[in-house]
Image (cartoon, helix red, strand yellow):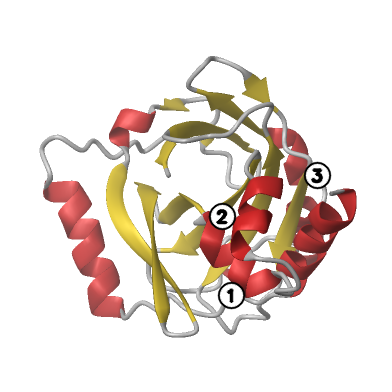
Amino acid sequence: MKGIKKKLVTILGISLFVGCNIKKEERKSVKNEITNNSNEKISRGLSNDLVNETNFKDNVKFFEFNNQDYKGFKKTILIEDVFYTAAILPKDYYILKNLDQKDSLDLYREKLKKEEVIQLDFQQIEGEDLFKKKNFDYEKCVKYLSFNIKRDFYAITSKGDTIKPKGVFFERNYTLAPYKRVLIFFSFPYEINTEVKLVYNDKLFEKGILKFLLKK
């Protein structure tokens, strides 16, 4: 069991997610859609402001592997010029994509039923490199996203349990994609069947505490 979990984290870490190359016009339409929706308030948050999960845009997202789509849900918020998008990776998707099929899919589902991987993307609204746009020190940002960011996440289950991540992985795409992506690995005391809340204290862009109520 420990070997499979370790293997999952390692292979997920190596995998490069290249996609979501959103056209400029599409990014503008997303911005307008969120801005014009009277039920969606865009927080222009300052440091330490609380951004509640009710402010988020909720959309279906399909994760593709081997010409097969796996349905999930993503939540996106725009704060100033940065999009934050979070999603729980569909279990079958990351099992098939990242594990050798030496055992049956059902066996992997059972062994990993208490494990969840949450994907969090940061993207500048015009698709520019966030680190350059903000005049950040690149190496310090990479170090934070690779290691220290782990301390700034936790999850809250529907039963009220607070769980810290067991690991994070920063996918370095070397500007091949318009976003910065972090994978957050959680091990829960029981299976998550409906939703879980991801809480992130944003120390990178100093936008405050962000809360994502994520559906499975």
Q: Secondary structure at mark 2?
A: strand
The label shown at residue 133 is: none
Image coordinates of residue 51 in percent, x first then y, are 41, 30
* Residue identifier under label 2: 119
Q: Residues within 10 Å of mark 3 (few under 14, many from 20)?
A: few
Q: Residue at x 55, y 80 (%)?
A: 18
The label shown at residue 148 is: 3
Marked residue nearer the N-terminal end (2 or 1): 1
Are circles 3 and 1 on residues that touch, CB within 8 Å?
A: no
* Residue placed furthest toward the right: 3
> In the image shown, does 105 or 132 lie closer to the viewer?
105
Amino acid identity at mark 1: Phe
The answer to whether 85 appears left or right of 41 in the picture is right
Q: Residue at x 76, y 35 (%)?
A: 151
Q: Secondary structure at mark 3?
A: helix
> In the image shown, does 199 or 126 lie closer to the viewer?
199
Marked residue nearer the N-terminal end (3 or 1): 1
Amino acid identity at mark 2: Gln
Image coordinates of residue 104 in percent, x first then y, are 65, 65
> In the image shown, does 45 or 103 lie closer to the viewer?
103
Q: Quadrant of residue 107?
A: bottom right
Query: For the residues marked 3 and 1, what is the alpha-carbon distance in whole angstroms?
Result: 22 Å
Are circles 2 and 1 on residues that touch, CB within 8 Å?
A: yes
Marked residue nearer the N-terminal end (3 or 2): 2
Compared with 116, 137 (above or below) is: below
> In the image shown, does 48 or 83 lie closer to the viewer?
83
Query: For the residues marked 2 and 1, what is the alpha-carbon distance in whole angstroms?
Result: 10 Å
Q: Residues within 10 Å of mark 1 (few under 14, many from 20)?
A: few
* Residue identifier under label 1: 17
Q: Quadrant of residue 20?
A: bottom left
